Amino acid sequence: MAVRIPAAFAANMLEGATLQGIDPAGLLRRAGLPPQPTDLAAPDFVRLVRTVTLTMDDELGGLQHRPQRIGITAIMAGALSHAETLGEAYGRAVQFMDLMDNSFRYGFRESGSSVMFELTRIPGREVLNVMAIEMILVLVTRMLSWMAGNRGATNAAWFDYPAPGHVAAYRGMFARAPMQFGQSSSGIAIPAGLMKLPIVRSEAQAINYARRTPLDAFLPVDAAVGLSLEVAVAVENVLTVERRLADMAEVCSALGIAQHTLRRRLKKEGVDYSDIRKQVRRDLAVRLLTTSDASVEGIAERAGFSEASAFIRAFRSWTGVTPRAYRLSEL
């Protein structure tokens, strides 16, 4: 089934132009869209974003305190392509965006097994609606993952606003990661192991990618693809049925592949077997917390933990809060 972009994204994209006196009906007409679009096909949404940003000469569509002129993201992408590793590229991105001195201050820090890419509002600066934050988090993290030849992975995501009406779309945008709303900042936690990946795209490739934005920005992307996805499915099958985590030998037997081959191919995809097992277990626990009335003890057992206390410790390490606190934040 073709991916549909919620109509809320289009409404939020048009708000900045409307406040600056630009007729939204004219922008929709120029993009080849009806006067009041509902959910949009991805190519239609991309045309709308490009129409708005080019008309305004503002890559941020009037959503932030001051315009970000067309071409700035391409300049940044070219500069980041000269980083040695993904971690270095993130550090450079934060410095570059802080120099623009717009609506946010940016941060990049390590925390346990994750690194945090974070943005905090500057008091008194305009942030028109939630799309200002959505665009930055999604566009920057996906572009940098692409530069490293990786599809990316997200351990957690958090936002400094209440859950929006289109929150269902966030599951695809943020790779099914645990999410929290109403926080003091917004950001994404990324597996620290990915930061060692080398940047493999050239300056020309990076600039061309930035010019294509937002072609892939708001489409669902699973962290697990290719062999990673096959392994995740095999692990999930055992966990769901037998309530335990499968070891590598079992998965290799199910997939008909040698263990050394599995390790080598997963390494090429930028992941390892233990990370996949952790993510499958985490995804199951989050899904049960948000879609069922099962007790914390019951969820711990179904997620393959021998004791609820071990589950609570693990969940806190994933999200920073206890399972009960996370469940309450989702209500």
Image (cartoon, rainbow, N blue to C red):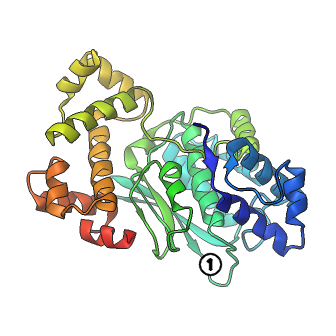
- The residue located at (18%, 24%) in the rendering is 249
Residue reaching furthest left?
A: 306
Q: Nearer the viewer, residue 237 or 261?
A: 237
Q: Nearer the viewer, residue 225 or 74?
A: 225
Count of numbered labels shown in the rendering: 1
- The residue located at (90%, 67%) in the rendering is 23
Asked which secondary structure carries label 1, the reply is loop
Q: Nearer the viewer, residue 120 or 291?
A: 291
Q: Nearer the viewer, residue 240 or 141?
A: 240
Vertical placement of 106 versus 143: above or below? below
For label 1, the residue is: 122
Vertical placement of 50 versus 17: above or below? above
Give the side of residue 90 with respect to residue 292, left or right. right
Query: Residue 165, position in %: x, y?
Result: 56, 67
- The residue located at (26%, 46%) in the rendering is 281
Query: Residue 265, position in %: x, y?
Result: 38, 23
Q: Picture quarter containing residue 234?
A: top left
- The residue located at (56%, 62%) in the rendering is 166
Identified by mark 1, the residue type is Ile
Does the image show residue 62?
no
Q: Picture quarter containing residue 189?
A: bottom left
Query: Residue 105, position in %: x, y?
Result: 59, 70
Give the side of residue 221 with respect to residue 10, left or right. left
Does the image show residue 162?
yes
Q: Considering the image in quadrants, where does the N terminus appear?
A: top right
Q: Considering the image in quadrants, where does the C terminus appear?
A: bottom left
Give the side of residue 206 with respect to residue 172, left or right. right
What crowding class fits label 1: few (fewer than 14 Cα within 10 Å), some (14-19), or many (20 or more)?
some
Query: Residue 175, position in %: x, y?
Result: 46, 48
Vertical placement of 131 versus 260: above or below? below
